Every structure is written in structure tokens, then in C-alpha cells.
Image (tube, grey):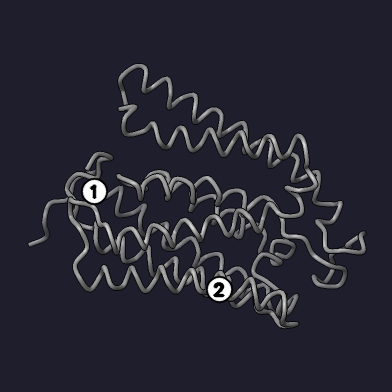
Amino acid sequence: MVPDVSTSQRTYRYLRLALAGAPVALLLSVLFAMPDVGVLPSVSHYFYTSARTVFSAALVAASACLLALSGRGPQRVLLDVAALLAPLVAIVPTPVSAGEVPGVVVDCAAPCVPAAFIDDLDNAIATYLSVGAIVVSVGLILARRGDISLRDSGPTLAVAAAVLVLVAAVWSLVPELLVAAGHVAAAVGFFGSIALVALAEAVCPPGEHPPGRRMRAGYLVVAVALAADLAATFVLGLLADLPVVLVGEVVALTLFVVFWMMQTAQKWSLADPSLRA
């Protein structure tokens, strides 16, 4: 007999599965672009190829799912940070050097974002900041009306406001810094947040529906592996003339899928996917 499933349970299950599918779609788009452009230095370089549409769409979709599913407790704040950083990974291109991406004209000596993409970036950052401000404003209005609890939603609204202010300040005062380092900073922040959530699930799991001993061990493995992957990718990327960053990003995305499938299995049968523990 199939157990009864509420509408909220079904919605949350579909969102969880969709979030697991987003990085898979991203990696498939990269794979399908390889016959045309070859193996590039990183996954992020495929932003400049035919994979661009799926690359950006998958990250924005993942952001929306993360905000909807971030849950409760300290882990919620970390997942909200990841959700706020994912769109920046999608819209801020990684700097590239001349000849790295076939067909892309790079008009500078050092690695940079080609001039042809700067206008797109202006539009994307303005949209990101505007939508973020609208979301925070709606959240504050709903909290004041009593439709949502400020105690539960307050940390998310505060984190969102802080990220928006930081991005707006950097883009207004030192836009060259955002262009040069924004993509890498957002990507490292995203995966670092996921590693911290996995670590928190292992050492201080939530009181309601906590993971079993084996799953806690699995979370610890994911946290350590993700941190080690980020460190190794950074160090070897500076030293080796190989697509080390590409491999490191693929490993990080794979670990994210593993982490999220563990979260999905752990919380699949939750009767009340509410914010408060």
C-alpha cells in the first residue's frame, strides 16, 4: 500500500530531486560542448561556449531550490548563503586568456573577461541586485504582517541583505575586482558553505529526524573530501599546466550531488517540512 503523501511533501520531494538534477544538467551541457571546443581549463570556461545557457540556468535553478529547501537551524543559514552565491557563479564569467576558448576574442594580455561580455555582466548584476532587494523587501513585509515568523526568516533576510550590500558596494566602487575575482570567490564560497553544512550534519545534527550513524559518517566524508578538493584544486591549479581546475570542479559538483542525495534520503519522509525545529 502506498502511504499518503501531502501536497507539501510532494512539492518538497520534487524540489529536492530537481536540485540534485541541476548539477547533472550542467555537467551534461559541458560534455556535449566538448566535441566542438575540446577540453578547456575549467568547467567555468564553458560559460563562453554553447553550454552557456544550461550552465547559467542550472545554477539559478539550484539557487531557487536551495532557498526553498534550506530547512532549519544553523545549516539553514549556510544553505541560504550558498543559494545567494550560486547566481553569482552563473552570471559573473571566469577570466580567460587569449586562445583558451576557441572562437572567443580576448582583447587583453592577462586573463580577463572579454569586453563583449561586460555589457551582459552589467545587466546581470543589476538584475541580481534588484531581484534580491525585492525578495528581501517582500520578506520584511510578510514578517511585519505576521505571515512569516521573523525569528525563523530573520537570519536569511539579514544574510541576503549583507550579500546584496557587499556585491553592490564592490560593483560600484571597484568593479574590476568583481570582474577579476567574483566568479572564483562565489564558487569557493558556495562549495565551502556546502562543506560546512555537511560537517554540521555530522557533528551536530538537528534534533528532529537526525541522520543515522552511517549517514553521519558519510556527511563527514563529504565535508572532508570537499574541503580537500577545494584546497588541492587551488594549489595544483597554480602549479600544474593541466586542466586541474576542470577535474576539481567536476569532483566538487559530484560531491554536491552526493551530499544532496543524502539530504534527500534523510528528509524524504518528513511530515512537516517547516522552518522551526
Q: In this orientation, which residue lies closer to the viewer: 260 or 248?
A: 248
Is 268 above or below relative to 242?
above
Q: Which mark is residue 250?
A: 2
**Distance between mark 2 and mark 1 Cα atoms:** 31 Å
**Tag 1: amino acid:** Gln
| Residue drawn at the location 39% of the way across and 31% of the way down | 154
Q: In this orientation, which residue lies closer to the viewer: 91 or 194?
A: 194
Residue 197 % position (x, y)? 38, 57
Rendered-image quadrant of the C terminus:
top left
Q: Element type at marker 1? A: helix
Q: Which of marks 2 and 1 is nearer the N terminus?
A: 1
Residue bearing mark 1? 9
| Residue drawn at the location 64% of the way across and 71% of the way down | 234
**Tag 2: amino acid:** Val
Q: Quadrant of residue 102?
A: bottom right
| Left or right, 235 with reference to 155 | right
Residue 247 % position (x, y)? 60, 78
The answer, for residue 69, to whether it is visible in the render is: no
Q: Which of marks 2 and 1 is in front?
A: 2
Q: How crowded is mark 1: few (under 14 residues within 10 Å), some or many (20 or more)?
A: some
Is 180 above or below relative to 140?
below
The answer, for residue 73, to whether it is visible in the render is: yes
Q: Quadrant of residue 7?
A: top left
